Image (cartoon, rainbow, N blue to C red):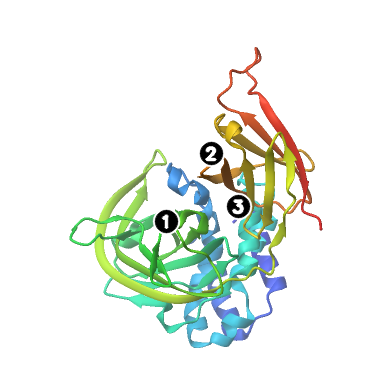
Amino acid sequence: MGNYERNFIEKMREEIEISDLVNDKLEESYGKIRQGEVKMKQRGFKSNRNKFYRNFAAAAAAMCMVAGLSGIFYVNPALAQDIPILGNVFGRLQELRTNSEYPDKDKTAYENISEHAVPVQEAGNSAENEIGLMTVSDAYCDGYDMYFTLSLRIEDEELKTADYIMPMHQNPEDDSLYEGGTYTIDQKQVWPSEISALRKAEDGVYVGLCRISSINQEDLSFEGKMTVSADINGLRAHKESGLGVMDAFQETKGDWSMKFDVETDTSSNRAAEPNAQGNGIIVQKAVQTPSNMHVTCYVPAELAEKNPTFVLLDGSGNRVMMEVAKMNTQEDGSQLQEMIFNTSQADQFVMQVFDKNAVGDGNGEVPLITEISFSMGE
């Protein structure tokens, strides 16, 4: 066991006050880590859809404790309320791995998300069939993004050899299985922006994360208390090959239907309407949430034709990477650009706008249309 794992265990011991019942279960999990039964793995699976979560399984050894404690928390809900296991696990992982090669999203947003996640305790948050038990244990929503955890416990010996398992869904009147599940919010179908594979946490236990972004949904906002349904119709098991590629070796049909409530919490959001301008482009709104930064910009019609590209810098000149953008063209030809960036809690920002359609100069530089400084201050 390396220094990171040893530090992780000691820090967890220091900071979580727990009962003897839970302590015994943690000790069992620590033993598995020490004996090498649960190991940290490096991912080689190359898929754009899973890029955001390609390092999620680095938490597998820690999540072994979460999975092992789930049975205790199910029959002792007070323990689940009093011990924020998800927050402590992810927060400690981020602190101890600040010098790792993880992207910024893993270093910052996961810690923030876990701190604000709420245990899911409805009776419908678990579903079981002859293949195994699937559970949603924690959920988070900041009004822009919703995250919830998925865990799977199986007994089938062949399935248990998988390095990861992908949830699948089946379309009506179609016998084939397709990647991902079927999800609804208040009975309206939604499409996740990211679904992480369920990675092996311990023998027979797999854990993953689902993200649903409001920017990808039509006529749906995340407000108040929402009822979420998750329907899984099968599993596809994968193993890592010697080249680091994930090979599917088994598809299994089976139905899991889960229903749970998620409460939107915007108390940690920070919003500003700077209306800062440059060359006709206006930074209308900016919102910092625990998981991301959201910026809305107005682009006049004459500049919309230039297919402008936006680059966000914080006050120290560090680039805040964009995740996705949505363009809404108005009747007069102007545009509203809704952009999601990685999380940043800076106070000052500069939005650079480039003319992507223009011919660059002799040095290959893309022409800059404008730079707009704005503040998140009052």
The amino acid beneath tag 2 is Gly
Q: Which residue is mark 1?
A: 197
**Circles 1 and 2: CB distance less than 8 Å?**
no
Residue 33 seen in render: no
Residue holding disc 3: 106
In the image: residue 115, left or right of residue 323: right
Is disc 3 in contact with disc 1, using a CB cutoff of under 8 Å? no
Residue 348 x %, y %: 79, 47
Q: Is residue 70 visible?
A: yes
Give the x, y percent position of residue 130: 26, 74
Q: Which mark is residue 333?
A: 2
Badge 3: residue crowd in 10 Å (few <14, some 14–19, many ≥20): many
What is the x, y in percent for residue 29? 53, 70
Q: Secondary structure at mark 2?
A: loop
Amino acid carrying label 3: it is Asp
User: Which quadrant of the rendered structure holds the N terminus?
Assistant: bottom right
CA gap between label 3 and label 1 equals 16 Å
Give the percent coordinates (x, y) of residue 360: 61, 18
Identified at 60% across, 72% down, the residue is: 85
Circle 1 SS class: loop
Side of 266 where 65 appears, left or right: left
| Residue depth check, mark 1 versus mark 2: number of the one nearer the observer | 2
